[in-house]
Amino acid sequence: MRVLIIKTSSIGDLVNTLPAMTDATQMIPGIRFDWLVDESLQEIPQWHYATERVIPVATHDLSKNLWGNLIKGKWWRMKHQIRTNDYFAILDSDGLWMNGWLSRYANGPTFGLDKESARDQLATRYYDHTVAVAKGQHAVERVRQFFAKALGYDFPRAVANSGIKLDSEPSAQSIALTNGNDPCLMFFCGASWETKLWPVAYWQTAAKLAGRKGYRVLIPWRYENERAIADEIAKVGKHVEVFQRSSLTELAHTLNKCHGVVAVDTGLTHLAAALSIPCVSLYGPTDPGLSGAFGQNQVHLFANYSCSPCLKDKCTYSGPKVKNQLNYGQGEYVEPPCFSSLMPGYVFDVLQQQIEVKFGAPVKIAAVAN
């Protein structure tokens, strides 16, 4: 039995789909999955043991440069690959019009969210069957329910299991980063919204606290603006390392060796949760109840501010500004101000508690000299 999953969205959306695949494999023996996925994220489906084939699609090129995409042959290759199999079901659990449109190129009945459940109501026009899944639940649980209804099995009551299996060998960089004597923390400091960014001064203070406790701090980056933030954080000491841009699989290998994570609301936070790495994730403008990191050893800290969560990518707060009381970082005021309620000392203490919960005792480490 072969099923096609259509996912053209974010890291978090892909990672949050993996537990539903695990459910399906336990309820329907022999089921296998193909994925139609954005080419920049095609590594993620390969982490699950039930994935048979990944079909990349250049969704960003399609929206920005359709003619160039046609010339390169990417579109024609995708259409050929997607039509080579007859599918028992074609699933779009996101309810996006792009996914619905792409689903019509595959052979098999299409299933998607109904008008009350989908993100884009236009998407429902492309489906053969629509499924109702109540809003107001976490994304992981919604996808699990969607798969159960679409594929015809009872929703399992077991705890969500991502089923991630990193078959490839870790790279030389990953081994070098995590093979030292000192335990590692990872900071995920980049995000797509500027309102999601914890102040650089707070990151620097957290890094300093980590060094005093004997941790090395690793900071990955994907885009140049994230690299600039990482470089600023690394100024606090030699125990902070900004590593080279890496593949998602290499990052997953490195993350899997870390003792803990501090993260803003970004896709990589969901990866830490899927791997059960102790993580403290920070939320200012967004609501962790619907899309926060989902898994064991996860703590959500959200801003205690009158305008939070605002769900805005640009800060529109017009009240009194909050002074920066820390020694590290530039800027007289805390921006965005909602994060002034999440001080780095408190965040680091919560992370330490989570690490101790996982390992059963304080991690025995020596202080790092800067």
Image: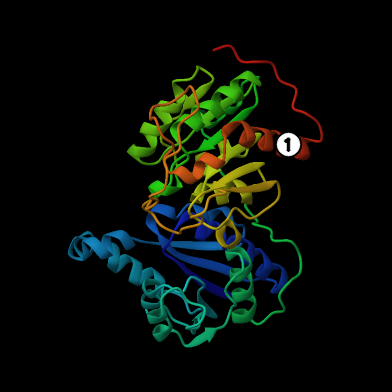
Q: Would you place residue 344 above or below residue 19 in this image?
A: above
Q: Residue furthest front?
A: 320
Give the image quarter of residue 74: bottom left
Identify the residue at horizontal 57%, vertical 33% (top origin): 344
The amino acid on which the numbered mark 1 sits, given as a three-letter code, is: Gln
Q: Would you place residue 215 above or below residue 192 in this image?
A: above
Q: Residue furthest right?
A: 360
- Tell me the quarter of the image containing the C terminus: top right
Q: Would you place residue 128 above or below residue 117 in this image?
A: below
Give the image quarter of residue 252: top right
Task: Give the class, few, some or many, for how many residues have Cα within 10 Å of label 1's Cα (few <14, many ≥20).
Answer: some
Q: Position of residue 85 (x, y in %)?
A: 46, 75
Along the viewing direction, whichever of 156 and 328 lies nearer the viewer: 328
Q: Position of residue 334 (x, y in %)?
A: 44, 37
Along the viewing direction, whichever of 345 and 184 lies nearer the viewer: 345
Along the viewing direction, whichever of 350 and 330 lies nearer the viewer: 330
Q: Would you place residue 291 above or below residue 207 in this image?
A: below
> For numbered disc 1, what is the local secondary structure?
helix
Q: Is residue 220 visible?
A: yes
In the image, is 241 to the left or to the right of 261? left
- Tell me the quarter of the image containing the N terminus: bottom right
Q: Is residue 257 visible?
A: no
Give the image quarter of residue 63: bottom left
In the image, is 194 to the left or to the right of 169? left
Residue under pointer 1: 353
